[in-house]
Image (spheres, helix red, strand yellow):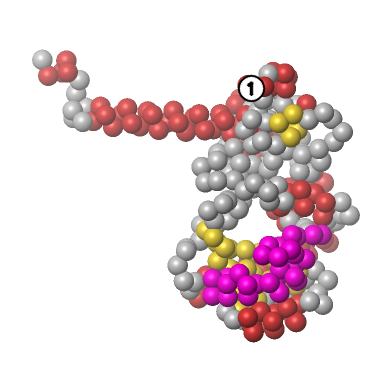
Amino acid sequence: MNTNFVVCKTESDVSSLTESLQGSSTLILDCEGSTLGVKSGHLSLIGLGSVGWDEEHTYIIDVRAIGKEGLKSIFDLLESSEYGATLRNVVDLQLANIKSRRLRGESGTEEQLSRLSPYLNEVDVSGDRLALQIRKTALVWSDSQQTGENFLHAANNIRIVACLWTHFEQAGYIDEIFPEQSLRYVGMWVSDQPKLGDGYRLHPLLPLTVLDGPGDHTTRQCIGCKGEFGPDCFSKAAWSGPEKRRCFVCRAIGIRLNRERQIEETRDSEYDSDDSGGFSVYDWN
């Protein structure tokens, strides 16, 4: 557990941070907040460190204490435009984990569906090139003032990410094309972030074409996630019918959403029946 880290709450703290890390060839970045990645989300903490991790060079930035203007030097460190950070040459380690499965020979449809089984039954999903993978669920973070436990959690994540980076790099999972794949992944919703409740874009499945790219095919828009995909990402019926044009991922999500809706309706129906103590009108006669 990482217990010797630097908490940054002032612009002076941030200046010391950037001076310490600006010569690093590879930075470790982790963010904590409430519903990150959606329009109503709130960023609370930014964790930064460097490869060749050590506790004294792990920094946890209290975003709300410093404010947006005070973060500009952080954005500059991450190659940014004003009031936002455009990450370049990024390596996403969640994606590296997924890519490593291919290199370990775990990329067949049978293996993919077995990993999907906690989410859907195999009979619910079909397709010759189903590229569905499980992602980790985003942390739920308090909107209140950060505590020592929050800072400790964020600092420990930097240690874990640094260890993962070393492992993936030594195993050969991070190749020359991986930054391009990562950029497709982390930049998917930059221009149009999902809103809370958007079931087709807020889910734990990896969107299609992130690893393999869009290809040279003619593309059509999925009516679920609004992504542009080629024919390999749709069933034949979905490709030819605009009203049914959901990619394989959104098809799986739609089945899940319908199932949850049916369960909720069943619960409501059972609750209504309990109002009379569980007896029908005929039981009273």
* 91 up-or-down from 256: above or below: below
Q: Nearer the viewer, residue 192 or 124?
A: 192
Locate residue 92 relative to residue 275 in the image: left or right: right
Picture coordinates of residue 68, whole percent (x, y): 61, 69
* Residue underneath mark 1: 244
Residue with the most extreme left position? 285
The answer, for residue 104, to whether it is visible in the render is no
Instruction: Tell me if residue 97 comes above or below residue 6 in the rendering.
Output: above
- How far across and down, in percent of the image, does residue 216 sit? 87, 33
State which quarter of the image contains the C terminus: top left
The answer to whether residue 66 is magenta is yes
From the viewer's perspective, tell me whether residue 51 is left or right of residue 123. right
Q: Nearer the viewer, residue 109 or 248?
A: 248
Amino acid type, mark 1: Lys
Image-quadrant location for residue 268: top left
The magenta span reads 63-89
Q: Quadrant of the N terminus?
A: bottom right
Q: Residue at x 66, y 79 (%)?
A: 14
User: What's the residue at 20%, 20% (across, down)?
Assistant: 280
| Residue 212 image point, x, y percent | 81, 40
Q: Is residue 95 magenta?
A: no
Q: Quadrant of residue 138?
A: bottom right
Residue 182 x/y as whole percent? 77, 52
Give the farthest residue toward the right: 176
Foreground of the two, 265 or 118: 265
Above or below: residue 217 compared with residue 18 = above
